[in-house]
Amino acid sequence: MEKKIMRVGVFGTLRGKAYVKAYLKVDGAKLTAVCDCSERSLDRVRELIDETVAVFNNFDDMIDSGLVDAVVLCNYFTEHVPFAIKAMEKGIHVLSECTPALTMAECVELCRTVERTGCKYMLAENYPFFQCNMEMKRIYDSGKLGRALYCEGEYNHPVTNHTKNGLAPGRLHWRNWLPRPYYLTHSLAPVLYITGNELKAVNCKSIFAPDNLKGTACMVGDLAAIMLCEMKDGSLARVTGCAAWGGHGNWYRICGEKGNMENVRGGLDKVRVQYDEWNIPEGEEEVQFIDAKWFEDEEMNELSVGAGHGGGDYWVAYYFAKYVNEDLEPFFNVYRSVSMSATAILALRSSFNGGVEYKIPDFRNEEERKLWENDHDSPFPDENGNVTMPCCSHPDYKPTEEDYENAKKVWLEMGYNVE
C-alpha cells in the first residue's frame, strides 16, 4: 500500500519558522507552502526552502492552491478560529499553534466545524513534550503513584519593558490586551497530559502590580493569574497563566495517593520522585532522581535534538502527521483544546468577579454548547479600540500618556510606524 504523505503549509513564518524546519524532516509529511503578509518574515524562511515550496502572501490563495492538505496556523493569537474554520471549510486539516478561541462562542463554533467538515484539528501545545513531562507521564501511567490528588503547573516568563514594547507594536496590538489567564497552556497542558484528566471548573485570582509595567502600552496591570482548576475525577490543580515575577522557569508537580513527583527546579532533564515510606513500590527507593528522556527508544530521542521548546516543536509536528495520515487521535484534540480556552475565558471573569467558580462546559455535549453559542464577549479590541470584557482584574486600569510615549519611542526604534 502506498504510504500517505501529508502536504502541509505554514501560515505565519515568524513563529512558523520552527514548523518549517520540522516539516522538512518529519516522516510522512512534505512542506509544500509557506504564507505571510510580511516580506521581512518570509525572508527568514527563504534560506530554508527550495523551489518546490510555494510562497504566498495571502492565506486564501494558499488554501485555494490545491497544494496543501493541512495548515499550521502561526498567525496572531486573536485570529486562529476564523482561519481554522476557513481552512476546514475547504477540507484542509488544522494544527493551531496556540489556544484557539477568544470567546465561548468561538469554542462552540470550532467544535461544530470539526464535526460538520470531518477535518482534523489539533493544538500544537509543545510543553507536554519536555523530557521531564514525558518521563512523569510514564511514571504516572505505571500506577506507582496512584491517582493524582493535587497538581501544580507554573510558567514564568518575565521580559524587560523594552522587550515587551518591541513584542507589542501599537496600542491595539493583541499582546497589549492579553489577559494573564489566557496564556495558560504552558502551565495547564502538561498537567492534563501527564494525568489524563479533564477539566470541570475553575476559579481565579490575579496579582495586580501595575508599577512593573510602567513605560509600556500594556492594558493589563496584572503580573500573574493564579487558577484553581477542578478536574472531573475530583482532583485539583493550581496553575498560572504567563506569570512575570522574577526568574524564568517552568515547574510541574504531581501529588498522588502514594507519593509525588516534580521536575527538578532549574532544569527540564531530571525528575524527583518521592514515595510514602509505607508505599514504596518493589524495586524502587523512597526518594530518587531520574534522568528524564523523551522516549525509551533512543532512535526516537535523536529526532528531538535541536528542535525548539525542549523538542516539543518537532513532536507536535510529528504527531499531527500521524493524526492526518494514520488517524492516530492526539491528546489535544479539538475538545480538549477548547476546554483550555474556556478555562482561560472563565478564569478571567472569575478574577474580576471576586474569584467565583465557573463550570467548564463539556464541548462534546451539544446541549451544554448551546448555552454558550451566543457568548461573544472578548477582552481584545476591535479596530476602534472597543472591547466587550475587561482584560485586567482591575477593569479601570490603563497606561498613562507618558507610558504610551515611551512605548512609541521603542516602536520607532524597531522600525514600526504605528500608534
Image (cartoon, helix red, strand yellow):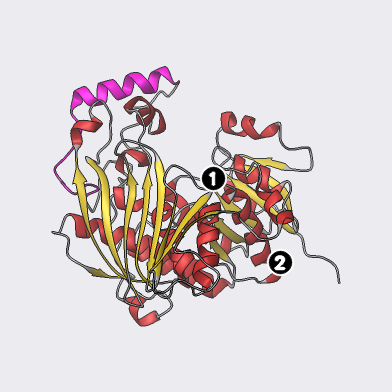
The answer to which quarter of the image holds residue 165 is top left
Q: Position of residue 312 (x, y in %)?
A: 57, 51
The answer to which quarter of the image holds residue 236 is bottom left
Q: Amino acid at mark 2?
A: Asn
The number of callouts visible is 2
Q: Is residue 129 left or right of residue 4?
A: left
- Between 65 and 114, the one lying in front of the other is 114
Q: Amino acid at mark 1?
A: His
Q: Residue at x 62, y 34 (%)?
A: 42
Q: Give the structural element (helix, strand or loop) at label 1.
A: loop
Q: Give the structural element (helix, strand or loop) at label 2.
A: helix
Q: Report the disc number at residue 325.
A: 2
Seen in the picture, residue 326 relative to 206 is either above or below; the reply is: below
Q: Is residue 46 visible?
A: yes
Q: Position of residue 284 (x, y in %)?
A: 52, 67
Q: Is residue 58 left or right of residue 81?
A: right
Quarter that holds the C terminus: top left
Quarter that holds the N terminus: bottom right
The answer to which quarter of the image holds residue 336 is bottom left
Residue under label 1? 309
Residue 363 in the magenta stretch? The answer is: no
Residues in magenta, as a range = 390-414
Q: Earlier in the sequence, mark 1 or mark 2?
A: 1
Q: Is residue 125 visible?
A: no
Q: Is residue 285 left or right of residue 157?
A: right
- Between 46 and 105, the one lying in front of the other is 46
Q: Are marks 1 and 2 in contact (CB under 8 Å)?
A: no
Residue farthest right in this picture: 1
Q: Residue at x 57, y 28 (%)?
A: 40
- Between 40 and 385, the one lying in front of the other is 40
What's the distance in space between the residues labelled 1 and 2, CA to CA?
25 Å
Residue 399 in the magenta stretch? The answer is: yes
